[in-house]
Each structure stands twice: as C-alpha cells, then as structure tokens.
Image: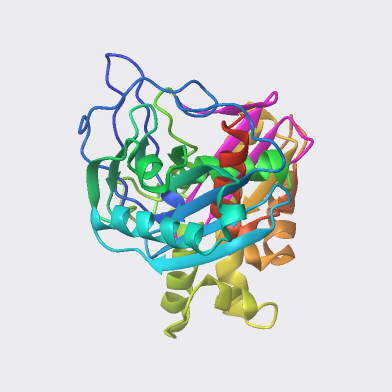
Amino acid sequence: MGIEQPRMPGSGPHTRGTDCARREDCPAAGHGSTGHPSAALGTATSTAALPDNALVLGLDVGGTTIKGEVTDAAGTALAVGAVATPHGPAAFDAIGELGERLLADLPESDRRRVRRAAVVLPGIVDTARSIAVFSSNVGWRDVPVGDRFTHRWSVPTLIEHDVAVAGWAEWRYGAGQGYDNVCVVILGTGISGTLSVGGRLVRSGYGQVGEYGHIPVRRAGGLPCPCGNTGCVETVASGAAIARAYTRRTGREIGGAAEVFALLPGDLDAAAVVADAVDALADGLVGIVHAACPELVVLGGGLAGAGAALTDPLHRALTARLRLVPAPRVVLGRFGARAGLAGAALFARRGALT
C-alpha cells in the first residue's frame, strides 16, 4: 500500500489530508470534489468550548481498530470500548454502533452531560463538507458523513483528520504545551505530523498535514517508495521499514520495530538498522528545522515507545547537521499511541483546533 499524492488543482484550495502514519493510499489526482477549507485551524463546524461539567465522546478510527471513550474535563474515561474496523463503508456503521454502546454504558445522569462528540478519520478527509474522501486501509471512497452521527447519537459531532488532531493535541496539551513553535512527528507504519509556527497550527491550502515521510533523502541507491518516489524517509525510518531492514540484514523475521529497539544495545545489527533510520529521519527533518525553527520536535505514534533510544540519537543527528539555526529539543509525546483518541476528546471539548 502506498501514497499517490493528490495534485493541487488550479481552481482554488481543497480540504484534504493523508494519513501517512497509518500508510494510506490516496486516490488519483483530481479524484473527488473537496470543499473550501475550514480555515487554517479546525473545521467548518467548529464551535465554542464546552463547560467543565460537560462530558464528550471521542472516536479514533484506525485501519484495524476503532477506539472510543467518553471522558470528563480532566480526561478521566467513564466508558471505554474498541471494535475491529470493518472494510469499506461498513466501518461507519461500526463507528455508530460503538458510539451508541459507549453512551448506553453511562448512567442516565451522565448520558445527559454528553454535549459533543468528535470522530477522527484516516485518509483524505473533507471536513468542510463532512465527507470521508478516501482510505485505502479501510476501503472507503467519497462516503458522506454529514450529520449521521449527530442524529444517531443525539449529540453534535465534529469530524477531522486523525493526524491533524493527534499533532494538535500533542502541541497544545501534551509535550509541546507552552511552546509556540513545535514540530510533531507521528511515527508508525508511516510517518507524518504537524507543524505549529508562531502559535498557529499550519495546514496546507487543502487541509493536508505534513508528509514528512515522503521527503526523499536517499535518491541514489534508495528503496522505491509506494508514493512513486525513491528513497523517501518512510522507506528507512518508519516502523515497518525498520523491521524489514533488520530482516534483510540478518535473515531473521521480526515482529516489528519495537523488537528491533528491544535488542539494543547488544545486537550490532539492530544498532546499525536504528542508526540508519535515525540518519534518514534527521535528513528529512533538517529542512523543516531550517525553515520553521521549531523549539521542540515531539515524537508520537507507536514508534515513540522506543524512548531515549530514539530521541537522544535523533537530537545528536540534528545537532550535527545544523549550522545556522539552533537544534530543537527532541522529546517524546505525552499521549504516545493514544494521541488520536486523546486528541478526539480534546477536539470535541474545545470545538476547534485552536
């Protein structure tokens, strides 16, 4: 599965986003009609923040699992659930059923306090017109979301792109809290993230998040990337790429990148694979650091579980490459692999990505 990047049409901005952290295929250029972006920060249906006594329902839709929670203002979960993600538009029925079940699990007094919901989706998401444009992992295309969940749950419901929400949550409420200039990198099967500059979340003209994983860093002798390019960061530094590189080097099958990091420091093959991944990630980020001068680079997603074995060498690699701007601190995200779900709850509570 790969990325076929949507081309910018000449007739104005479009609201789109791709989920490289979950490795989504985008449709062919020009596919689908997307609407006017919902401003640089948030969605067209954004609204005022909720009072502290309100509860919210948040759902994070992944390629394999749909996770949901009802939480209070302190982030305490009052109801939690997860279901396997069905293939195709049937996923939206599963989203609706999970939300219903979580609401039904609440005492009636708490059910009345649920004031808003948010559903964060992978792939290309047209938030202005509430359409799930495309997701290859889940297998939907041009599914109108509209107010189906608002009607089904009797709760106003927002939708957004999952990586945008995850990165925003880490910036505003997680490891980047208190900083105006933050680069969040979501590391998983793929690599993407967000960039906040001068206290504003940067979104492209059509709503896309940062495709850090598709910055070419190994054009000469690099591996082909599903996006059609050669030597992208993602072909070396993603979780899947790290696991594949270890297997190629040793001939031993391994369950994932976490197992490679667990072999450090004693396994020389694991050390070499991780060093190569860190170099590729640093090469990809150095241009972003020069352009935006973030104070922090926050690592989120499943691969961030590697901890200091990833943050320390990445900081050293960035420092070695920078001459004109200071090296940002490299820190682990507060929410880790839960950034999408935590972000959905925070988005529902705040009403906008501000």
Which of 176 and 118 lies nearest the eye of the viewer?
118
Report the magenta residues as a range.
177-204
**Residue at 44 percent of width and 86 percent of height:** 252
Which of 38 and 327 lies nearest the eye of the viewer?
38
Provide residue 179's location: percent of width, then percent of height.
77, 34
Q: Residue furthest front?
A: 108
Provide residue 304's location: percent of width, then percent of height.
63, 61
Provide residue 18's location: percent of width, then percent of height.
39, 42
Can see residue 190?
no
Can see residue 91?
yes
**Residue at 45 percent of width and 60 percent of height:** 189
Left or right of residue 152: residue 340: right
**Residue at 29 percent of width and 63 percent of height:** 86
- When the figure is inspected, residue 273 is found, relative to residue 15, above or below; the finding is below
Any magenta on residue 34? no
Residue 31: quadrant of the picture: top left
- When the figure is inspected, residue 281 is found, relative to residue 246, above or below; the finding is above
Q: Tell me, what colour scheme is on the image?
A: rainbow
Provide residue 271's location: percent of width, then percent of height.
62, 73
- When the figure is inspected, residue 72 is found, relative to residue 64, above or below; the finding is above
Residue 1: quadrant of the picture: bottom left
Any magenta on residue 195? yes
Q: Residue furthest top?
A: 11
